[in-house]
Image: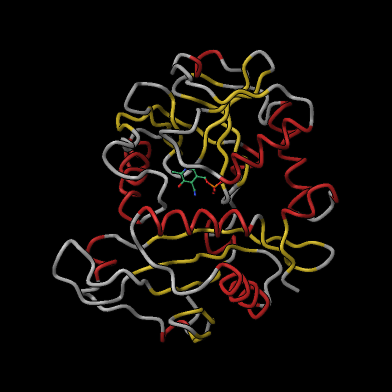
Amino acid sequence: MDAQREVYFNGAYRPWNEATVPLLSHSFGRGSAIFEVIGFHATPAGPALFRLGEHLERFRKSSSLLEMELPLAPEALQEVLVGLVRRSGLQAGYLKLFGFYPEISYAILPPQTRCQLAACIFSAEELTGGGDASAAQGVTACLSRWRRLDPRSVPIEAKVAANYVNGLVARQEARRRGFDLAILLDGQGFLAEGGTESLFLVRRGRLLTPALGAVLQGITRKSILALAGAMGLETGEEPLAPGLLAEAEEIFFAGTVGRIVPVRRVGERNLAPVPGPVTARLAEGLGRITAGLDDHYAGWLTPCA
Ligand code: PMP
């Protein structure tokens, strides 16, 4: 990471190497940092953040589920983030926003409720190490032996660092077994999602995704459902039996990073063509929206030029 890269930290834009957190801070030791990863894309009007309002609303929800008090109102925070994108000079990339407790803490309860904010920007190349062909070629996926976090144990709708050990162990297991990504079942045995991705299936022409409850309220998920409805596709948010992985015509992951990633093999089963026709249509539609080429969805973009 470039030491001079500008980040937002403790109320000001600063160089990257000034943004440090004490070793004994609550968020480092207990994983209590909340976060959002927000994409920004090149449009004819310059870089634009995708669904910024939705991300800030989910951030607020994460904070309230963890009794964290945010130091900035949404409008002021929006201004800070738009400014950070503008100052970066990048046309496309990702912005990661944090709310965390930098105070030294020896106990499970944080010493105060008011959190500190930080945000930084990184490019797609930094994220993937360059040469990520998953959107074009598809990925392999396996059914994980780990279950999705139980909503009776932790607030799974909070994007909080500690929750991500769930996705971490699932991805490690997938890698050990020779697969790219993991699919987790929920506590009831229904399909839930990937470690850090929403899951979609196409079955008899219907676009299916697990109902909310045991899965994160993905913003890409919500956008795809809206887009599919507008395209005249029949959609369903419902409990999905794992057997559907053997029957679905198409399977894809969805998330801010990678947007729509088709699955070319699930377990021992190969899927073809990749991407399937519905996946390809949705990916194309979403690509036009994020590129600022579909006026109908202009409200999903926040210009940063
Ligand atoms: N599920 C989980 C568990 C995630 O961490 C993410 C990434 N935020 C997603 C789904 C996809 O959500 P989004 O489309 O908002 O990036």
Image quarter where the C terminus lies is bottom right
> Horizontal and vertical percent for residue 40?
66, 61
Which of 45/105 is in front? 105
> Horizontal and vertical percent for residue 218?
54, 43
Residue at 20% from the left image edge and 63% from the top image edge: 109
> Horizontal and vertical percent for residue 220?
60, 44
Q: Quadrant of residue 196?
A: top left
Q: Is residue 94 left or right of residue 162?
A: right
Q: Quadrant of residue 135?
A: top right
Q: Quadrant of residue 88?
A: bottom right
Q: How is the image coloured?
A: secondary structure
> Horizontal and vertical percent for residue 79?
63, 74
Which of 29/65 is in front? 65
Residue at 76% from the left image edge and 40% from the top image edge: 284
Check the image and report above or below for 88 versus 269: below
> How many marks are shown on the rendered structure?
0
Residue at 78% from the left image edge and 33% from the top image edge: 230
Check the image and report above or below for 216 versus 6: above
Residue at 44% from the left image edge and 23% from the top image edge: 267
Check the image and report above or below for 152 versus 290: above
Q: Is residue 40 left or right of residue 36?
A: right
